[in-house]
Structures are given as structure tokens and as C-alpha cells.
Amino acid sequence: MKKGTFVVLASGRGSNFQAIIDRVRDGYIDAACTCLVTDNPDAYAIQRAEDAGIPVEIVSYKAFSDKDKYENALLSVLARYNPDLVVLAGYMRLLGKKIVDSYNGRMMNIHPSLLPAFQGLHAQRQALMYGTKIAGCTVHFVTHDMDAGPVIVQRAVRVLDDDDEESLSERILIEEHHAFPEAIRLFFERKLQVDGRRVLILP
Ligand code: GAR
């Protein structure tokens, strides 16, 4: 009997989604991924879900006349699967209050920077432009403010003199593929304890 279930939201390529389901398959994460939800009917993540036999729900933003209706549709899809955890793996939309409140402490996002540095889009480009020597990724709980929730796992990479956005993004992505499964595993082992802004990792 697995420790619980989770649903993944992804908008595109889905390499994080793939890394996560690979770690479910090899037993590192003791939980079942019951659905992939995407806002993008062309997302490559859909192919990955189909290959893994995971149900796909397409909730296309364009199919709704406003954000509220879109979010209600998303909420009702999520409610149908009733997951213990919602995982945002390259999901490129900001979620509204209703959804964030519904999954308070049970929704995680990955961001390609060492937060709180470089929130928002093109985080790797922002790091290069700023000139930091260290970059990385962050898995955090989702709160109302974008890329600002309590930090669960971070992994760092060195920025090299000859890096461009692509090479830096690639090396950060390798770390993302470790960081996200680790955070999800800790969640299902009930080892994450949120204490204000800090996430304590129980022994
Ligand atoms: C990842 O680098 C992820 O950190 C980033 O999008 C990429 C998705 O890649 N997410 C964000 O920037 C969210 N603000 P993937 O589709 O191959 O997992």
C-alpha cells in the first residue's frame, strides 16, 4: 500500500514530471501519480504520461472566458482525483487564491533559481545577467505570492565563465531532477514540518 497520491501540473516539456515518475517506478517515492493535468494541449508531458499509463486531463486556459472559470474547472478536476499533494512541474501559470487555499501546505513548485533570488520568468537568464557565481533550483510550498513560499529543497550549481542561458539551464535542470523527487519523498514520509517561513526536515 503506497503512502498516498499526487497529481502533477505541467505546461510543456515535462522533464521534471518524467524524473518524478521514474522515481516512483524505482520505489524512491512511495506514492502514486494518479494524473497529469496540463493547460497546454501540445505539451510533450502528455506523451510522457501516456507512455507511463498515467491519465491525462487537459484543462486548456483558452477554453474558458476568464481566469475564474478556468480555475473552477481546474479545481473540480483536482477534486475528482482528491490528491494528497499537487506538484507544479513546469506549470507556467499563476494559480489564484481559491486553489492555493485549497491545497495549502500540500502544493509544491519548482523554480530554476536559488530563491528568493530571481523570481518569475527566465530565472537562469536573470542569474547570468546579475553575474552570480552560484545558481540553482528551489522546491517550495506554494503560497499566494509568486515563488515566495517556504523552501523545501535547494540545490546549487556553479556558474561558469563560458555559460550561456542554455548551458546554465541544462546544468540546473539536472539538479531539479534530483531536488523534486527528494521533496516529494520527504512529503510522503511525513518528514516536512512547516514552521513559519522555515521547513524543518524531521529525522
Ligand atoms: C524547469 O526548469 C522549471 O524549473 C521551470 O520550467 C522548467 C520546466 O521544465 N519552472 C518555472 O520556471 C516556474 N516558474 P520541464 O517541463 O522539462 O520540467
Image (cartoon, rainbow, N blue to C red):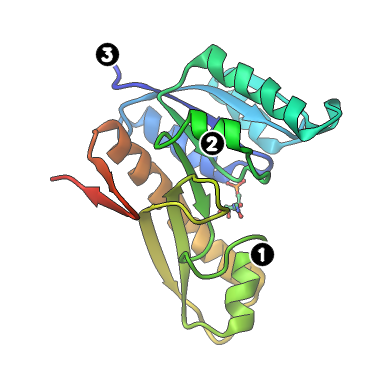
Residue identified by numbered label 3: 1
Query: Which amino acid, mark 3?
Result: Met
Residue at figure coordinates x 63%, y 60% from the top left? 120
Q: Disc 2 vs disc 1: Cβ atoms closer than 8 Å? A: no
- Image point (47%, 31%), residue name: 103
Across and down, in percent, residue 115 comes to: 47, 64
Which mark is nearer the camera, 2 or 3?
A: 2
Classify mark 1: helix, strand or loop: loop
Asked if residue 91 lies left or right of residue 184, the reply is: right
User: Residue type at mark 2?
Assistant: Val
The residues bearing labels 2 and 3 have C-alpha atoms spaced at a distance of: 28 Å
On residue 100, which mark appears? 2
Residue at position x 50%, y 28% in the image:
102
Give the mark toward the camera: 3 or 1.
1
Q: Which residue is mark 1?
A: 122
Instruction: For label 1, count other residues whose C-alpha is less than 10 Å away and answer few (under 14), some (14-19) or many (20+).
Output: some
